[in-house]
Image (spheres, rainbow, N blue to C red):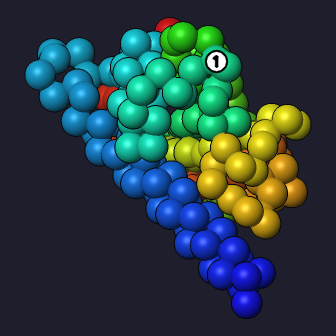
Amino acid sequence: MIILLLFVHDHYRFYELKDKVKSSAYLAASMVQQITNTRSNKQLTFDDIRNISYASCLNFFHTNSMFSPWPFGIYYVAHFYYVKRLNKDSYMYQKSYGATNSYYINARITNVSTITTDQVKAMHQDLVCSRDGEERVCIDVNYGTFDSTNKNKLGFFILDPNNIHEKSVDGRTNNFCIYQLIITPKPGLFPVNK
């Protein structure tokens, strides 16, 4: 009976964390679409990605617990995978992300490159566009784990976050909870200006 109660508790806690990641993804998507509304230049910037990542993680991390030494044993990452169809087998591509690091949000924006339709399909089937000029963004939000993540820090009795490895768009597997959301961005937001 005690084991059953612990299992029920862990099951609830796991889905509570998954729901927080989902909420973060929708919050990030909303901010992507709205953050530049009051600016004449609508293109997203490095600072926008960093601010969106910071604000979207606050529904779980209310204090500096998101930063090193990561008292909960997990860290937060928000990835933004942008594609724009150039022709039937060619896409413009850019990856950007913001992640909690030592006392600041670490952000990175890659250079714009060209990839094939097969590479887009490998990332996520819903990123494939139906016409030239169409744009899509996959927002991939997750809580990453460390090898030393302690289940007790997250309130688990049986479930071990180190044994749960959900796969992200770029193939990373150190994700404890993950949610992917595909959006069509407003024109002019992407690619992110480095």
Quadrant of the image containing the N terminus? bottom right
Residue pictured at 88% horizontal, 37% vertical: 147
SS class, disc 1? loop
The percent position of residue 72, horizontal first and vertical second, equals 63, 37
Q: Is residue 113 visible?
A: yes
The percent position of residue 190, horizontal first and vertical second, equals 42, 29
Taking 125 as reference, is 44 left or right? Answer: left
Q: Quadrant of residue 39?
A: top left
Instruction: Determine crowd level at label 1: few under 14, some 14-19, many 20+ residues with C-alpha closer than 10 A.
Output: some
Residue to which mark 1 is pinned? 68
Residue pictured at 65% horizontal, 69% vertical: 10
Identify residue type, mark 1: Ser
The residue closer to the viewer here, 107 or 36, is: 107
Q: Give the residue at the far front of this rendering.
A: 2
The residue closer to the viewer here, 75 or 120, is: 75
Taking 104 as reference, is 102 left or right? Answer: right
Taking 174 as reference, is 31 left or right? Answer: left
Residue pictured at 54% horizontal, 27% vertical: 66
Q: Give the residue at the far bottom of this rendering.
A: 1
